[in-house]
Image (spheres, helix red, strand yellow):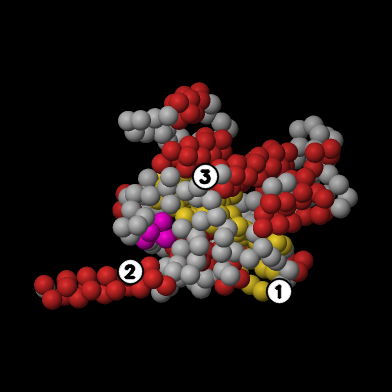
Amino acid sequence: MIKHTLLIALVFGFSFGLSAQTKSTKTENIVLITLDGLRWQELFKGADSLLVNDTEMIKTPGSLMQEFWDANPLKRREMLFPFLWSTVAQKGQLYGNRAYGNNVDNSNKMWFSYPGYNEALSGFADDARINSNDKVNNPNVTFLEYLNQMPAYKDKVFAFGSWDVFPYIVNEERSGVPVNAGFDLAEGPNLTPVEQTVNRLQQEIRGPWGGVRLDPFTHHFALETIKTKKPRVVYIAYGETDDWAHDGEYDQYLWSAKQTDKYIQEVWETLQSDPFYKDKTTLIVSVDHGRGTSRTSWKSHGEKLPEASQIWMIAIGPDTPASGEMKVKGQWHSSMIARTVYQLLGLSYPDSKAAPAIKEMLK
Ligand SMILES: [Zn+2]
C-alpha cells in the first residue's frame, strides 16, 4: 500500500513537473460562454428574412427592420452581433458557416440542452445515459470538475447559468464547483454592493419562465465574481435565446442575441483590462444545439429536426490564431471543447473517451 502511494506520488510529481517545464501555451485562464439554442444561421447571416417581419413572430410589424435588417447578410450579422463581427472576427476565430463547408455539429443525437452541455463539458456524447433534461446529477466528469481537482485550479472554478439544471449538469455536489443557476442568489459573507442589488432585483423580477431566469442576473453575478474573486476558470451559460424561440417570439430572440453579444464584449473587455487576465485568458463561445429552419420549426429542436445538430464555436485568446471567419472545409464537434481547453492550458485531458482537441485553435 505504501509502495503504491509512493509510486502515485512520484508519477504525479513527475507529470506536474514536466507539464510546468514544457508548457508552451500562454493561456492560464479559461472563460467558456454558451448561448442556448442560438442558430448558426443568425450568427453568420443575421436576422432571418423568413421571420424578421412575420407578424405572427413579432409583436409590432416593421419594428425590427431598422435595427436588424439589411439586404446584405454580412451587414445583417454585424447589426446583430457587433462585437463578434469586429473584435472577435479580427483577433479570434468563428467556426460553423456551412456556406463554406465549415461544419460544426453535436456529437450526440439528441439535439437538446443537457446532452449538448454534457458533451461540451465532458468531451463526449453519452446518449445512453444523458437523454433527458431531467435534474439528474451528471455521471460524467466535466473539465470543470477535473480542473477543480488540480491544486493550481482548486476553488478557482466557477459556473453560472440561467437554467436551473446546471447544478446537475456540472454535478455541483460531487465536483465542488459552485454553480449559481436558475434563481440562485449570490451567497457568502462578503457580498459586494452589486451582488446585493442583483440579489434584490432577482427576487423582484421573476421573468417569463419557471426554470430559467433572465440573463442579466446570470451575467452580473458572473462578472462580479470575475472582478472580485479572480477565478481561473469560469463557465457562463446564457439561456434566454432558446426560451424566446420556443415561445415563438423572434423579436425577443434577436434582442436577446444582441444583448448577449454586448455581454460577451463586457466579459472580454473586463478580462483584457485586468493584468491578472490580460493576454493570458482564452474565451470560447458555443451553443448546446441548433434549431429548425422553417417558419414554424425554428421554434423547436430535437431528434426529429436534423438541422438542430448544426452548431457553431468561437475562440479568442493568446494561443488562437487570428483566422477570423473559418472558411476551410471540415467537421468539428462541440465534444472537442473539453480537450481543447486542457491543451490551451498546456495540460493533457485525463479522459481518453474525450474527442480530440481543435488543432486549428492552437498556434
Ligand atoms: Zn430548447
Can you say whether 332 is above or below 174 in the image? below
Looking at the picture, how far across and down is residue 222, in whole percent? Answer: 49, 41
Decide: marks 2, 3 in contact (CB < 8 A)?
Answer: no
The residue at 69%/65% (across/down) is 323
- For numbered disc 1, what is the local secondary structure? loop
Residue 126 drawn in magenta? no
User: Which residues are drawn in magenta?
Assistant: 142-147
The numbered mark at residue 329 is: 1
In the picture, the quarter occupied by the C terminus is bottom right
- From the image, tell me which residue sits under label 2: 16
Can you say whether 63 is above or below 48 in the image? above
Name the side, left or right, on which 62 lies relative to 203: right
The mark lying in front, picked from 1 and 3, is 3
- Badge 3: few (under 14), some or many (20 or more) residues near its Cα, within 10 Å? few
Name the side, left or right, on which 229 lies relative to 5: right
Tell which of 346 and 210 is nearer to you.
346
Seen as rendered, the residue at the extreme left is 2
- From the image, tell me which residue sits under label 3: 274
- For numbered disc 3, what is the local secondary structure? loop
Tag 1: amino acid: Lys
| Image quarter of residue 185 | top left
Tell which of 290 and 302 is nearer to you.
290
Task: Mark 3 and ligand 1: say if the CB distance to the nearest ligand atom is below 8 Å.
Answer: no
The residue at 51%/73% (across/down) is 356
Decide: marks 1, 2 in contact (CB < 8 A)?
Answer: no
